[in-house]
Amino acid sequence: MAEEPGVTRDRNYYQTSWNRKSFYLVDTGGLDPTSNEQMTRMVKFQTDIAIQEADMILFLVDFKVGWQSLELEIAKQLRKTQKKVVVIANKADRAEDTDRIQEIRRLGLGEAWAVSAINGLGVAELMDYVASELPEKVEADAPEGISIAVVGRPNVGKSSFVNTILGQEKLIVSEIPGTTRDSIDTQVEFEGEKFVLIDTAGLRHKTKDKDELEYYTSLRTLRAVKECDVAALLIEAPQGPVKQDLRIAQEILQAGKGLLLVVNKWDLVEKTSETVDEYKKFVQQGSSFLSFVPILFVSAKTGQRVAKILPLAKKVYEERQRRVGTAELNDKLGSDIERHPPPAVKAKYIKIYYIAQVDTEPPEFVFFSNYPELIKDSYIQFLENRIREHFGYDGVPLKIKLKKRK
C-alpha cells in the first residue's frame, strides 16, 4: 500500500470472511471534522454514509502518537451513532506495547485493541473478536450482474456518469482532476437485469517520474478492467479521442473485454443533423481498430441518453458470450474463403480446411491450414471482418489462431 496520506477518498468495499462469517470491510478516507476544505468535506460525506450503513465501526488511531484533539472530536461524533465501536491502536509494533492500551480506552468508546498492521501483531485476535460481535444475519455475497468498468482519462466525468445512472451521490463528484482513486463497485438493477458498476480512477499517460500514488491508481483501474465483463470508455466530446483514450481502448481489447465508447459532454457540442455521423467517421478513421465498437453520445450533466448505456452493455455482454456452431461457421466462411483464398507464398498453395470456435469471453476461432505460418496479417484481418459481417460481435474483440492440420 502507499505510504502517502489521502490515497483513500471514496468508500472502498472489500468482501472478506473470518471464522466462517462473511462480511464487508469498508475502507474510508481520513476524517478531519474541523476542516472546511472542499475535498475533506466530500470525504466526510462519504464516510458518514459508510457509518450509517455499518453494523460495526472500527476506529483506527496511531498508537505511537496517541490520541489527540482530532481523535477526541471523532470519538464524540461516533458516540452519537449509538453503534458498536471498536478502537484499534495501530503501530503497536512490540509485544510490550499492548500493556499501554489502557490510555487508548480513555477515548470512552469501550473496547480497544493494540495491533501492528505491518507485522500482524494482534490482528488475528482482533478479527476473532470482530467476527464474534457481528450479528449472525450478516451475509456478504459478491455483487451479482453484468460488471461494467467505467474508465477514462481523469476528469472526463466518470463519477458524474455513474451517479446519473444510480440517481444517488454514492461517489464523490468534483471538478478537481483525479478525485477518484479507488475502484468502487455498485450494484444496480435495470429492467429486471442486474449490473455492477465499477467507477475507477483516471488513467494517465505513463511517465518516467510517475509517483507512487499514480502507480497504485493505475493498478486499481487496470485491475477493474481485467475483472469486468464490459468497459465503458468515456471520452470528452469537445476534445474528441486523444492518444490516451486510444491507449486505454487498446488495453481493454487486449484484456479480451467488451468495449463501449461513451462520448460524454455531448451537450457542449454545436450540432447539426449530420454531426453524429461525422463524429463516428472521425473516430473510425483515426482509429480503425475501433470500427466494431458501439458509440453512444451522452451528457452526464443533463442525463441525455445515459439510460441507454445499460441495455447496450447487456447487448455487448451477450455478444461476448456468443458461440457459433462449427457447421454454420464453415458454411458461411467457407464460401468467402473459396471466393477469396489466401494468396500463395513462395509457390506454395495455402488452403484453409475448416474453422471452429473453441472459446467465448472473448470468442476465439481456430483456422486449420496446411501452411498456417504463411498466412499474412492482412488475410487474418479479412477473416475477422467476414466473421463480424456474418455474426456481429459488436464491441467484442476476437481471437483468431491458425493451426496446422495434422
Image (cartoon, rainbow, N blue to C red):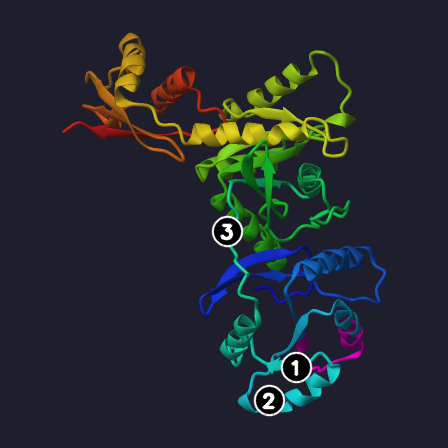
Asked if 49 appears above or below 390 in the picture, the reply is below
Is 308 magenta? The answer is no
Indicate the secondary structure of the residue bearing disc 1.
Answer: loop
The picture places residue 331, in percent across and down from the top left corner, at 27, 13
| Region in magenta | 61-75
What's the CA distance linking mark 3 and mark 1? 34 Å
Mark 3 in CB contact with mark 2 (< 8 angstroms)? no
Could you tell me the amino acid type at mark 2?
A: Asp
Indicate the secondary structure of the residue bearing disc 2.
Answer: helix
Which residue is labeled 3 in the image?
Answer: 142
Q: What residue is rendered at 56% in x and 20% in y?
A: 285
Quarter of the N terminus within the rendering: bottom right
- Quadrant in the rendering for residue 344: top left
Sequence order check: which comes first, mark 3 or mark 1? 1
Most foreground residue, 25 or 210 = 25
Asked if 81 appears above or below 156 in the picture, the reply is below
The picture places residue 52, in percent across and down from the top left corner, at 71, 59
Could you tell me the amino acid type at mark 1?
A: Phe
The picture places residue 346, in percent across and down from the top left corner, at 22, 19
Mark 1 in CB contact with mark 2 (< 8 angstroms)? yes
What's the CA distance linking mark 3 and mark 2? 37 Å
What's the CA distance linking mark 1 and mark 2? 9 Å
Answer left or right for 357 relative to 262: left
Residue neighbourhood size for the residue with mark 3, other residues' Cα within 10 Å, grouped as few (<14), some (14–19), many (≥20) = few
Could you tell me the amino acid type at mark 3?
A: Ala
Label number found at residue 63: 1
